[in-house]
Amino acid sequence: MENKVLIVSHTFPPASGVGGRRWAKYSKYLNRNTITPYILTSKSTFNESLWKDDVKEIKNIFYYKNFFPAILSKTQLTFLDKLLYKLAIVFLKIFTKGNYYDRVVFDKNQFINKIDSILKKEDIHTIIVSGAPFNLLYYAATYKQKHPQINFIVDIRDPWTWGQNYGINLIGSARKQIEAQKESLVINEANTVFVPTGIMYDYLIKTYPNCANKIKVLPHGFDSDSIKPREVKPNTQSGKIKIAFIGELYDNIGHYFDKISEAIEQESSPFFIDFFSRTDRYKDLFSQRSLVGNKVNYFPLIKADELFEKLSEYDFILIIHPEFAKDYISTKFYEILYSRTPIIYISMNGETSRFIETTKSGIYLDIDHTFEFFKNDQKVREFKYEVYKDINKFELNYLTQNSLINCLTLDHEHPSK
């Protein structure tokens, strides 16, 4: 009998967005390990995913309609947009319970009908549902209640009720309590709960001690298909240090860039920074010091295989996290470690800074030491890079074979709940 699994991810290639990366990659490796992935995702008109090539072998992709107000997804608002935004929030507050920023808040009935139809038609007994949006997990949990024979695997990619993202920090206490009830139902109904980091695992087993045996860490991992470890050692001794910044330019990190721009303006600073991102945020901090086109340049984000080939030209990769992400070890870290390129990591002290220091894979800076570091090459010359010897444990095929696949079968006579 064919091994099958239904994977639900709100974003999935070819739709753009980093949220689709995790299950695009795991679907690819499930498929290579003779498990057929069926995908349920939202229909998107933005088809510019960097991971389209990873899912070219995935044939069974289904879609649900998403009815969330489009105005809330815009980042640059005109006066009329701002008015429509406020009206949309009022509408959501009236017609929803819990977190009205959750993007599938109006999709419950048609979403449940979709998963029911796919599971029955394709004779699938295991479903993996990834959130955020977290209501996808809740809807699937209510389906599990009526169909206890289903192997229900939950993937919580980011903190839910205890986080600062996805609007949870903007809603009132009564609505947060509703979200807490949803989260509790999901954890209790799930057969397996995956989280990507140890700090999320620690939180959940402390909050739900009776469910600790089914909560597991499934890291984001790196794809060795798209990264070739560099052969040339990074430069830490010459008068020109080339740095690349790759990925998202988050909110609330402008103060770090202000310190960097002030420092590299100094004649003694040897640092040159190239940005590879979807936007040119914070560019004005460098422009006002006449650094753009001189010591700082901005480029579009490119596909991973091309990107890491390009990054072999750089001596360091710069990563800056806002406070809410100080404990977040993303895919990017494992990819960079595998590429054998040192990291300059700037944020508040937390899980991620400890990871950098423990693996000896880079240099950690807080706001108080950022200017001092970038104004000259003294700290760079003192740095000794070490190759992280355990990196292969975070390779996606290894994780698929040793962590994910083990949870795809369920003893139907003794379901673990």
Image: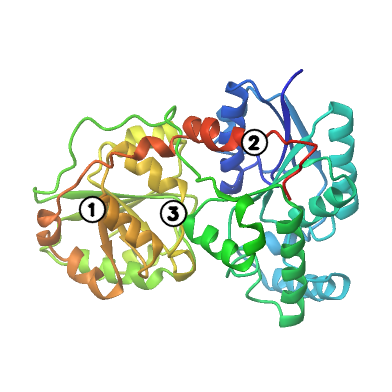
Specify whether residue 43 is in view.
no
Q: Residue 299, percent across and down?
A: 40, 46
Tag 2 secondary structure: loop
Element type where label 1 sits in the image:
strand
2 or 1: tag closer to the N-terminus: 2
Q: Which residue is mark 2?
A: 14
* Distance from Cα at disc 3 to Cα at disc 2: 25 Å
Q: Amino acid at mark 2?
A: Pro
Identified at 64% across, 38% down, the residue is: 407
Q: Which residue is mark 1?
A: 272
Local crowd size for mark 3, using a 10 Å CA cut-off: few (<14), some (14–19), many (≥20): many
State the residue at coordinates (83%, 71%).
97
Q: Amino acid at mark 3?
A: Ile
Front-most of residues 46 and 365: 365
User: Which residue is at the front of the view, 171 or 280?
Assistant: 171
Q: Secondary structure at mark 3?
A: loop
